[in-house]
Amino acid sequence: MFKLYYAPGTCALASHITLEEVGAPYSAERLNFKENQQNSPDYLKINPKGRVPTLVTDNGVLTETPAILAFIAHSFPDAKLVPQDPFAFAQVQSISSYLCSTVHVAHAHKMRGARWATEETSFADMKRKVPETMTACFALIERDMLKGPWVMGEQYTICDPYLYTIGLWLEGDGVDVATLPKVIAHRKRMSERPAVQKVMAEEKA
């Protein structure tokens, strides 16, 4: 039995969807970020980073979305969420890494400026930059990464719930989604999957 710690509106949604997709035995525990539960002593004992997602397994604790998604996929190979070919799997990891290290960081500048600067004026400047940087990130995804109908083409992979999750932030980040028809079509296809519908209903409850 796995245990996923998550907070609504965060990148943990991708791991939550993937656990549901593969039919994993798991429980999900919601953290209230408004009450700073991610920095509570009890939670910091589990994940000293004070962030989500965190996946507790029989072998120990995993953090970071790309690692968790790859672990779930390899733990449930029948779901075929990653290619067997090493190069194709590396391509999947390349996309996941881009979403984690570049796109998510660009988004985080909107409300997490204190991670990178100390002056209030710097926070405001970073926030103003977000529509531009997120637009550039997703223009690249639209043009070069999203093959269609799924990210990697015909095979649904762990890239898909991850892209879906971060794509849900676009409007709030000031991105004109009319310029991203493939991304929005992908979002619609994702929203029709039973696992996505179940998890979204749970996280919104």
Image: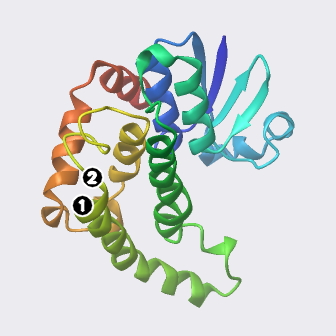
Would residue 30 be visible to someone looking at this image?
no
Residue at numbered disc 1: 142
> What residue is drawn where x is 22% and y is 43%?
186
Q: What is the x, y in percent for residue 70? A: 56, 34
Would residue 39 be visible to someone looking at this image?
yes
Quadrant position of the C terminus in the picture: top left
Q: What is the x, y in percent for residue 58? A: 77, 16
- Res 72 → quadrant: top right
Up the image or down, 147 lies above or below 197; here it is below
Quadrant position of the N terminus in the picture: top right
Q: What is the x, y in percent for residue 34? A: 60, 47
- Residue 146 is marked as 2
Q: CA distance from mark 1 to mark 2?
A: 6 Å
Tell me which amino acid carries mark 1. Glu
Tell me which amino acid carries mark 2. Leu
> What residue is drawn where x is 53% and y is 13%?
24
The local secondary structure at tag 1 comes to helix
The local secondary structure at tag 2 comes to loop
> What residue is drawn where x is 71% and y is 40%?
37
